Image (tube, grey):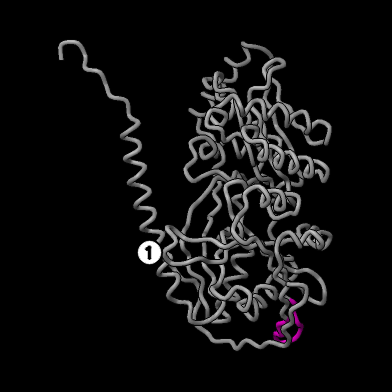
Amino acid sequence: MSAVGDPFHRRISMAEERVANGIRSLKAVGSATPFDFSVMPLAEVAAHETAWRALANSAAEPNPFFRPDFLLPIVDYLQPADPRVLMVRKNGRLTGAFPLVRTTVGFGFSGRYDAVYFHDYGPVGTPLIDRDMLDVTADALYRAAHREIPRGVIMHLDADGPVFRAMCRAAEQHGLPPFVLDRFERAALDATQDIDHFRKTALTRKKRKELARQYRRLSELGPVRAHVHTDRASIAGAFERYIALEALGWKGRRETALGSDARRMQHASDIVNAFALSGRIRIDEVAVGNEVIASLISFVDGNCLFTWKIAYREDFARYSPGNQLILGLTGSLLDDPVVETADSLAAPDHPMIDHLWRERLSMVQAYFPLRRGLQRPPALMQADRTLYRAARGTAKQLLKKLKRPKTRPTEGS
């Protein structure tokens, strides 16, 4: 466990507290300008969608998973515990939105905590904070938000991103250092580099030759074409093909594919349709002849692209269709004047994307105590997490041994 910041005490003043329509609202007075804090159930936030969308467009770090078009349907599907949004306003202008849920760390022995929502369907936990109000919003959070989230808040953030740095500056100012509970890296692409630089630095000579050989072999089966779908009508057909392709693979067999569950499919369709309307989605395909063998759904938000869902024909695995798809996407992004970064959203040490996209995002799971007297919970959380990981690792090893097929003795043995 590590800490960031030096102790320094700052008094917290409260100018006004009121309760109306079941929504608790606070007015925190800093050195000059007041801030309003509202914590409300997620279902009630839909009434504030106009301001919410404007904030998402001006966020210091883009996060498509906290746009209402994604967050509302995914929360309805996943049903997390006590979903709420902490909304921060200055002079009536929405400057911050923190989607919160109640969660545990490890086995949960250390209790339940508020956390900015983070899940497998949307593994980006950066709250929406106006880029022009970043530091003052983070500071206001420490001045008054502890009344609404008394045990502090857990966030998953990019350690090199402006939001984490702003939170750390506010923490240092208030003498309440955050505690980093976990660190990991995931693959990303610097889309500002040129294609020649990418080829020389990202791909080894051996890897380039292997991919070229596989592409030639694939071309022997028919003309290989790459398709990029961005308009609404084209997205609809590409999404249908993605669903069919995913159902043929291991996700279909494990019933984790989007189309394996009617509710999951409906919510995914709602998300894709909404993002298609706003022009924030693209679907890339690789086809041999008229047959699609690989498909990738990505979201585009600001100057960032986030790869979301990928599927490929497993009977074409010898030709590396997933690699061919990512290479096509990469070339397209390197020519794109808008996109500067692509986040793979992949697990650490991913066997495919890590060998193609060489840049890394340094991610942290950090606990931010927003008031004094919360030094003990981080130690309990860390111990709980360590115990949980040890138990999970042991269970995985046992399961692996149970699944391992017994070798038959050879003749004469």
Residue at horizontal 51 percent and vertical 37 percent from the top: 355
Residue 238 showing in the rendered view: yes
Judging by the rendered image, the residue that carries numbered circle 1 is: 383
In terms of image quadrants, where is residue 280? top right
Of residues 28 and 220, the one drawn nearer to the viewer in this rendering: 28
The percent coordinates of residue 202 (x first, y second) are: 55, 38
Q: How many labels does the image show?
A: 1
Q: Give the SS element for disc 1.
A: helix
Most extreme residue toward the left is: 412
Spot occupied by residue 51 in the image (x, y as percentages of width and height): 82, 63
Q: 180 or 405: nearer the eye? A: 405
Outermost residue to the front: 21
Which of 259 and 272 lies nearest the eye of the viewer?
Answer: 259
**Residue drawn 69% across the image and 70% down it:** 39
Q: Residue at 65% across / 32% down in the picture?
A: 259
Tell me, yes or no, whether the highlighted magenta stretch contains residue 229: no
| Residue 390 horizontal side relative to residue 235, left or right | left
Residue 357, quarter of picture? top right
Position of residue 162 relative to residue 305, above or below, is: below
Residue 245 against residue 95 in the figure, above or below: above
Q: Is the magenta stretch mostly helix, strand or loop?
A: strand
Q: In this view, does 289 lie to the left or right of 390?
A: right
Q: In the image, which residues are magenta?
A: 27-36
Q: Which image quarter holds the C terminus?
A: top left
